[in-house]
Amino acid sequence: MNYSKSFGFKSLIALVLGMVFISMSAFADGEKITKSQAKVLKKAKAKVEKASPDDWKTYALAAEMCFGKKVNMKEAYEWLKKSIEIKETPLNLRIKGDYYTQNNLPEKAIDAYIKSMELVKAKDPYADFTEIQEKIAMLSKELSSYEQ
């Protein structure tokens, strides 16, 4: 009887260690990624590596690529922050709004979208904001359903 208890414990330890090993080999940087995600990640990192220090657009678009595939989210968010630090633009603010939407932060998303629209409106008061307005309306509806 004592033998079966020690065998059970040893089996459990072996199982746990095996699962940890399998998990570590299946994940890259803590994320399990598909071939498609790996391809996007490789492209995004290559673009960022080649970007000049003041190239806000490359950082923003590389972040958007990663957000679109839900890969490398932490580093991609850092790229987006760097883009905004270099130059705040309607594009990087819209991407920031999309990131917040994706991460279920509707109030922050709305703020980013509004700021994006304000920057566009300052240059072109007749610009078409339909897409961003639809995003804001959807998020506002979501927020009001939380409050009820």
Image: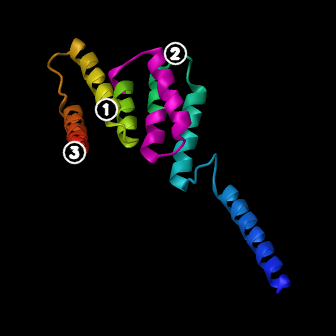
Discs 3, 2 touching: Cβ within 8 Å: no
Q: Answer with mark 2 or mark 1, whichever residue precedes in sequence.
A: 2
Tell me, yes or no, whether the highlighted magenta stretch contains residue 114.
no
Mark in front: 2 vs 1:
1
- Find residue 145 and name its label: 3
Secondary structure found at label 3: helix
Of the residues tagged 1 and 3, which is closer to the observer? Answer: 3
- Given residues 145 and 95, the one toward you in this image is 145
For label 3, the crowd category at 10 Å Cα-Cα, with few meaning under 14, some 14 to 19 and many 20 or more, is few
Residue at the extreme front of the image, as rendered: 1
Which SS type dominates the magenta stretch? helix
Q: Residue furthest right?
A: 3
Residue where numbered disc 1 is placed: 107
Count of labels in the image: 3
Question: Does residue 136 appear to the left or right of 83 in the view shown?
Answer: left
Specify the amino acid type for callout 2: Asp
Residue visible at 78% across and 73% down in the picture: 9
- Closest to the observer: 110 or 81? 110
Position in image of residue 76 (x %, y %): 51, 34
Q: Is residue 143 left or right of residue 32?
A: left
In this rendering, which labeled residue sits more in front, label 3 or label 2?
Answer: 3
Q: Determine whether 123 is above or below 65 in the image.
A: above
Magenta stretch bounds: 63-91
Residue 56 picture location, percent across and down: 47, 21
| Disc number placed over residue 54 in the picture, else none | 2
Residue type, label 3 = Ser
